[in-house]
Amino acid sequence: MPKHFFAFAFLVSIISLPAFSQESQDSVIRQANIRHSSKGFEFSTSDGNFLLQFASRLQFRFASPSDQNPVTFDDFDDQNQRLFKINRARLKIGGHAYRPWLKYYFEYELSQSNLLDFRVMVEKWPFLNFKFGQWKVEFTRERFISSGEQQLVERSLINRAFTLDRQQGMTIYGNLDGGGIANFDYWVAMLTGTGRGASSNDDSKLMYFGRLQWNLLGRPVPFEGGDMEISELPAALLAFAAVTNTSPYTRFSQAGGGYLEGFEDGLPGQYTVNQFQVETAFDFKGFSYASEFHKKYILNNQTNLTTDLGGYYIQAGYFVHQALEFWPEKLEIATRFAQYRPDLSIPENRQSELALAFNYFFAGHKNKLTAELTRFLFQDNTLSQSDETRIRVQYDISF
């Protein structure tokens, strides 16, 4: 086992010890309660002040002719990479300590030996909360939704270029409910801006992020794919998010900081990246809809040249049983169209994705089977058109 895993397990055991220890003053032993919920196995004390949740998730995937989304035209040349793999193997530990509003969460990727999330949340008031540590920044709904609760096998073509992924820092967030349509969520964050696992910044500049979300029907749309609850009342949101960062990187992923095509390995403070997105989502009676529209501006501080990027996706899903009784009740159909433009100054350069998926939910997102068919089309004004059709099947289970 990797040494990071042992350190992680030791830290978790230290956090959970108070739930099974004696009171320092009164020497009263807390009684532990054990149960299983959607968060996994739960160990809690009778006074409610300590809670430890322990869960794991496995994701098995078959893909043909390949699994990763194409990035360049060269990716279309290799048509013989059929594969079956364990795509994700996650260990999740969370809960609260000392008070119900003092929460913590860890997430570890066992297959790659990566500590993904570690954070502490102070959530005493709905309108004012605090979070410290490392987590997926709430910049886009698509990225923030867990990979185990997606409607399709994986996130869209544009995710690679526009996600902030995981960062380290602190954020202030909350819900402002004025009644009826006056319902808003907000996030404001200061982050190191060098990606997951970064132990230092490259310069004196931080990443600054903000998101304002209007729940225009008075109810938030859950951060999960599809209308799993078959909502009797409609829920909708309109959100705007923006970020600015100066670093050596032009993109982020689970691996940390990285580079988009056409940008060489950066030096400290070489790239200033400003980006924003407008987002919508809607759920009602088994129908779900989501969209994101992105713009990104990359300034190379060494050459003083700016590259503008753009992209969007539109996604919808429906539990057809709501309209046709013969359709299996637990079978959802979903579709997505995405388009990415790596340089807005060249209108002829476009990358497109059209996907169709079927989800069968044995126990909601905790136990599901997904089959997906995706068509990619790349256009470049200097190259011939390239396309690819991909098939993927995935089984995801949490326990």
Image (cartoon, rainbow, N blue to C red):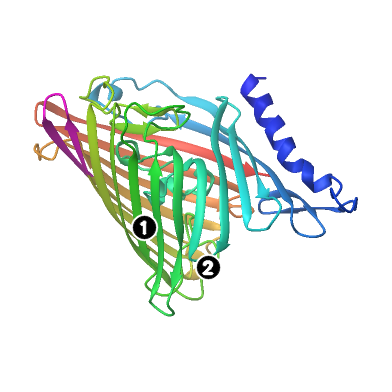
Label 1 crowd (10 A; few <14 / some 14-19 / many >=20) = many
**Which residue is situated farthest in the bottom direction here?**
180
At 51% across and 32% down in the image, what residue appears? Answer: 62
| Kind of residue at disc 1 | Ala
Residue 99 falls within the magenta-colored stretch: no
Which quadrant is home to the C terminus?
Answer: top right
Relative image position of residue 364 (x, y in whole percent): 60, 55
Vertical side of 222 occupied by 85: above or below: above
Residue 65 found in image quarter: top left
> Closer to us: mark 1 or mark 2?
1
Quick check: can you spot residue 300?
yes
Residue 308 falls within the magenta-colored stretch: yes
Q: Would residue 202 be found to the left or right of residue 311 on screen? A: right
Circle on res. 144: none
Q: Which residue is mark 2?
A: 230
Q: Which residue is mark 1?
A: 290
Identify the magenta region.
296-310
Label 2 crowd (10 A; few <14 / some 14-19 / many >=20) = some
Vertical side of 361 occupied by 70: above or below: above
Report, in whole angstroms, how far the alpha carbon at label 1 lies from the one at label 2.
16 Å
Q: 29 or 314, which is in the foreground? A: 29
Which quadrant is home to the N terminus?
Answer: top right
At 35% across and 41% down in the image, what residue appears? Answer: 163
| Kind of residue at disc 2 | Ile
Relative image position of residue 349 (x, y in whole percent): 14, 35
